[in-house]
Image (spheres, coloured by chain):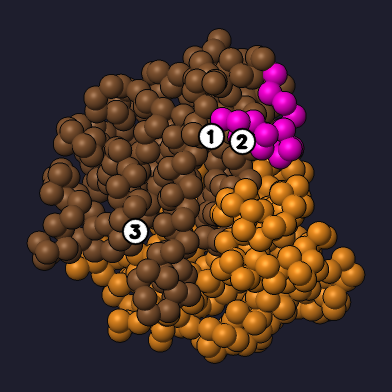
Chain colours: A brown, B orange
C-alpha cells in the first residue's frame, strides 16, 4: 500500500490513474517529488505573515480591502518573489494565477521583474515568465470547471505550489441575482468552488492567496458579527464578511489592506495581518514605487 | 448552467443522458463534480466512455491556462497606446490611452467630461486614423461641436469628412440598449469581414452612470448584477479586442471623509483601472472659466495626485494654458 496517497482506495485509484489518461503513468521522479512535498515557500514574505514568517502548504490567505489599496500590487510582489531564479533572489517556483476580472497586467509585472533583476536580458525575463500560468474566468461556473481541469496540472507539476485567485468575489452580485430567492441557490456555485479548492489544497499541498473586495459597509449591529468576528481581530478594519460560510471557514490568514490618505511619512498603504485561529495580529505599512512594493 | 444534451460533445448519446438524468445528473457541472465510478456502477455505463466525455466537456467549458511568456509575446505585439491629442492629458495618463484597459473620467455636471471625450474621439479619429464608437446616453453629444474640433485640426474638407466618418455614434438611454450596443460591437469585431466602418480602436461610453443609477437603490440586487454584467462586458471587450475604453461617471461625496468619490458605489469602483477627476476651475473674479483641472486618482502605473490643467472651451485641442499646470505628489 503506497503511503501518502490521498484517496482511501489505493487499488481503484491506481486503476483510475491508468485508464484516466490523467497523465501517463507517473515516473519515479514524479512520484518522489509528490511524496516529498511541494517546494518550500520559505521566505516568501516575512512582513506579511504574523507567525511563522512563511506560508505553510495548506494555508489559505485572504487579501481584503477597498479599491486602490494595493492588493494587486502585493500579488505582483509575491509573484516576482516566486518566479525569479534562485540566483536573482527568488524561490524559482511556479505560480498559477486565476484572473476573474481582467485585472492582470503582464507589462507591469515585467517592469517589476526588470527592476529586481538589473542586468536581465529578454531571455531571462521570458524564463521567469515561463513559471507563471494565467487563466481568465468569466463566471462562477467557469471558475468551478476550470479548477477541475487544473487538477491535472497540479498533479504533474510538483513545483507549482502557489495558486492565486484575483478575485474570488468578482461574481458575487451576478450569482446572487441568478440564484433567485434562496440564499442556498445563490451561494451554490461558490460553495462548490470552495469545496473543490479545499480538496486541491489538501491533496496537492498548495498555498492559496485570494483577494476579496470590500463591497459592503461594515455593519454596526453586533448580531451580524457574531459568527466570524468573535475570533477575529476587530482593529479598525472595515470588514464585513459576505461570501459563503465555507469560504470563511477555509481561510487561515486574513490580511486587511487600507490606503492612508495624506500620509506625511510617505508609506502610503498599510496592512493588518491576522492569523484566524490564533488571533494574532501584526500591522505594517508599505509603499508602492515603480519597482513594486517596498516595505 | 449548461444542461446535458445529446450532441453536446461526441460520445454523449441520448441513452446516456436518459440514464444520467434518472440518477439526478442534469447539467455539465453535476456531471463533472460527480464520482465517475459510482455513476458507472449505478447507470451501468462504460467507465472509459464516461471518462472520455468528462475530458471533452472540461476542455470545452473550462478556461485554458496560458503561459506568462506567451502572454507577454502576444501583448507586446497587440498592445498600443493611443495619444489623446493633448500633451498634458497624455502626461497624466502615462503617454495616453492604453488598449485593453478602462479609463474612468469622473466629475460633477458641467466639469467637462463630454468635452474631453469628444476631443479624444476627434484626435483618435483624425490624427491616428482609427475608428471610434461613441455611446451616448445623456444626449450630450453634439455633432457640430465634434465638427469644430475636427476643423481645428485640419483645414481640408476631405480629411474632415473622413475623420467624421470614422466616428460611429450610438444613442442609448437604458442599460438594455447599452448592452445590446456592446453586443453588436462584439459581433462586429469578431467577424473577420470588415463591417461598415472597420475595427474600432476607441470605445467611449458617456455616461455609464446615467443608465446605471436608475437601477441602484432599494433592496433588490438585480440592479447591481446588471451593473456588474455591464462592467464585465466592457472589460472583456477591451481585453479581447484590444480596445481602449473611456467611461464617464458622476461624483458623490464620501460621508465620513468628505472627499469626492465616484458614484455607483463600491462594487463599480473596482472596475476601471485608471481614474481621473475633472473639476472646473474658477476663472478670475470667480467666474466659471473654460479651464478644468484633471487629477489622477487611480492608476496601475503612476503615483496618484498628479494634476494638470486642460482648456476645454476653446476651439483647439485640449491644451495646457501656458505656465499654469500644477503638479503634486
Circle 1 residue: A9
Q: CA distance from mark 3 to mark 1?
A: 31 Å
| Secondary element type, mark 3 | loop
In the shown orientation, is residue A95 left or right of residue A20?
left
Q: Is A235 included in the stretch rendered in magenta?
A: no
Question: Is the same chain shared between marks 2 and 3?
Answer: yes
Q: CA distance from mark 2 to mark 3?
A: 34 Å
Circle 2 residue: A12
* Closer to the camera in the image, A83 or A125: A83
* Closer to the camera in the image, B184 or A224: A224
Q: Quadrant of the C terminus of chain A?
A: top left
- Say which label, 3 or 1, has the lower sequence index: 1
Please, is residue B67 above or below residue A190 in the view?
Answer: above
Q: Residues within 10 Å of mark 3 (few under 14, many from 20)?
A: some
Q: Are marks 1 and 2 in contact (CB under 8 Å)?
A: yes
Q: In the rendered structure, find residue A244 and report the number of the disc placed on it.
A: 3
Question: Which chain does the residue under circle 1 lie in?
Answer: A
| Secondary element type, mark 2 | helix
Q: In the rendered structure, find residue B147 and report the number of the disc placed on it.
A: none
In the shown orientation, is residue B81 left or right of residue A240?
right
- Say which label, 2 or 3, has the lower sequence index: 2
Q: Is A12 included in the stretch rendered in magenta?
A: yes
Q: Residue furthest top?
A: A87
Question: Residue at left 42%, top 79%?
Answer: A180
Q: Residues within 10 Å of mark 2 (few under 14, many from 20)?
A: few
Question: Is the same chain shared between marks 3 and 1?
Answer: yes
For the record, the magenta segment spans A10-27
* Closer to the camera in the image, A195 or B133: A195
User: Can residue A150 be seen from the camera position used here?
Assistant: yes
Residue B295 image point, x, y percent: 41, 57
Amino acid at each position: 500500500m503506497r503511503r501518502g496517497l490521498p484517496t482511501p482506495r489505493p487499488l481503484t485509484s491506481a486503476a483510475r490513474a491508468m485508464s484516466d489518461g490523467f497523465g501517463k503513468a507517473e515516473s519515479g521522479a514524479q512520484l518522489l517529488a509528490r511524496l516529498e512535498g511541494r517546494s518550500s515557500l520559505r521566505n516568501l514574505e516575512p512582513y506579511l505573515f504574523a507567525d511563522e514568517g512563511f506560508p505553510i502548504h495548506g494555508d489559505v490567505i485572504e487579501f481584503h480591502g477597498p479599491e486602490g489599496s494595493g492588493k494587486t500590487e502585493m500579488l505582483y510582489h509575491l509573484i516576482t518573489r516566486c518566479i525569479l531564479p534562485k540566483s536573482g533572489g527568488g524561490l524559482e517556483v511556479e505560480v498559477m494565477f486565476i484572473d476573474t476580472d481582467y485585472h492582470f497586467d503582464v507589462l507591469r509585472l515585467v517592469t517589476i521583474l526588470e527592476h529586481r533583476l538589473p542586468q536581465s536580458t529578454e531571455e531571462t525575463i521570458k524564463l521567469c515568465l515561463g513559471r507563471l500560468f494565467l487563466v481568465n474566468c468569466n463566471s462562477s461556473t467557469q471558475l468551478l470547471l476550470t479548477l477541475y481541469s487544473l487538477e491535472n496540472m497540479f498533479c504533474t507539476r510538483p513545483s507549482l505550489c502557489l495558486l492565486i485567485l484575483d478575485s474570488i468575489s468578482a461574481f458575487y452580485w451576478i450569482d446572487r441575482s441568478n440564484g433567485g430567492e434562496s440564499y442556498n441557490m445563490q451561494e451554490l456555485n461558490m460553495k462548490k468552488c470552495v469545496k473543490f479548492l479545499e480538496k486541491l489544497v489538501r491533496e496537492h499541498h498548495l498555498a492559496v492567496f485570494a483577494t476579496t473586495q470590500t463591497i459592503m459597509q461594515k455593519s454596526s449591529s453586533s448580531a451580524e458579527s457574531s459568527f466570524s468576528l468573535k475570533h477575529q481581530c476587530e482593529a479598525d478594519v472595515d470588514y464585513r464578511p459576505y461570501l459563503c460560510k465555507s469560504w470563511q471557514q477555509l481561510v487561515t490568514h486574513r490580511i486587511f489592506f487600507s490606503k492612508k490618505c495624506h500620509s506625511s511619512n510617505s508609506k502610503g498603504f498599510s496592512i493588518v495581518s491576522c492569523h484566524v485561529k490564533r488571533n494574532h495580529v501584526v500591522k505594517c505599512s508599505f509603499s508602492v514605487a515603480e519597482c513594486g512594493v517596498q516595505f | 448552467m449548461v444542461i446535458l444534451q445529446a450532441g453536446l460533445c461526441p460520445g454523449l448519446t441520448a441513452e446516456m443522458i436518459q440514464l444520467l438524468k434518472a440518477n439526478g445528473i442534469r447539467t455539465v457541472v453535476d456531471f463533472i463534480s460527480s464520482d465517475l465510478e459510482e455513476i458507472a456502477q449505478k447507470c451501468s455505463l462504460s467507465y472509459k466512455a464516461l471518462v472520455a466525455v468528462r475530458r471533452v466537456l472540461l476542455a470545452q467549458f473550462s478556461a485554458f491556462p496560458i503561459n506568462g511568456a506567451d502572454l507577454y509575446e502576444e501583448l507586446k505585439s497587440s498592445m498600443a497606446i493611443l495619444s489623446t491629442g493633448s500633451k498634458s492629458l497624455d502626461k497624466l495618463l502615462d503617454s495616453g490611452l492604453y488598449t485593453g484597459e478602462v479609463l474612468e473620467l469622473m466629475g460633477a455636471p458641467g466639469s467637462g467630461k463630454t468635452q474631453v471625450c469628444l476631443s479624444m474621439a476627434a484626435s483618435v479619429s483624425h490624427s491616428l486614423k482609427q475608428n471610434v464608437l461613441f455611446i451616448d446616453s445623456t444626449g450630450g453629444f453634439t455633432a457640430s461641436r465634434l465638427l469644430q474640433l475636427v476643423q481645428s485640426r485640419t483645414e481640408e474638407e476631405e480629411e474632415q469628412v473622413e475623420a467624421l466618418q470614422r466616428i460611429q455614434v450610438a444613442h442609448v438611454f437604458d442599460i438594455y440598449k447599452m448592452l445590446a450596443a456592446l453586443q453588436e460591437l462584439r459581433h462586429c469585431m469578431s467577424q473577420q469581414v470588415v463591417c461598415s466602418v472597420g475595427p474600432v480602436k476607441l470605445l467611449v461610453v458617456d455616461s455609464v452612470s446615467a443608465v446605471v443609477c436608475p437601477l441602484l437603490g432599494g433592496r433588490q440586487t438585480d440592479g447591481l448584477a446588471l451593473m456588474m454584467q455591464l462592467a464585465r462586458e466592457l472589460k472583456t471587450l477591451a481585453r479581447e479586442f484590444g480596445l481602449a475604453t473611456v467611461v464617464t461617471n458622476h461624483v458623490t461625496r464620501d460621508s465620513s471623509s468628505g472627499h469626492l468619490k465616484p458614484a455607483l458605489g463600491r462594487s463599480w469602483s473596482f472596475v476601471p483601472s485608471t481614474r481621473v477627476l475633472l473639476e472646473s476651475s474658477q476663472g478670475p473674479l470667480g467666474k466659471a472659466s473654460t479651464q478644468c483641472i484633471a487629477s489622477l486618482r487611480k492608476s496601475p502605473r503612476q503615483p496618484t495626485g498628479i494634476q494638470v490643467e486642460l482648456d476645454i472651451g476653446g476651439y483647439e485641442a485640449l491644451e495646457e494654458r501656458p505656465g499654469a499646470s500644477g503638479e503634486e505628489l
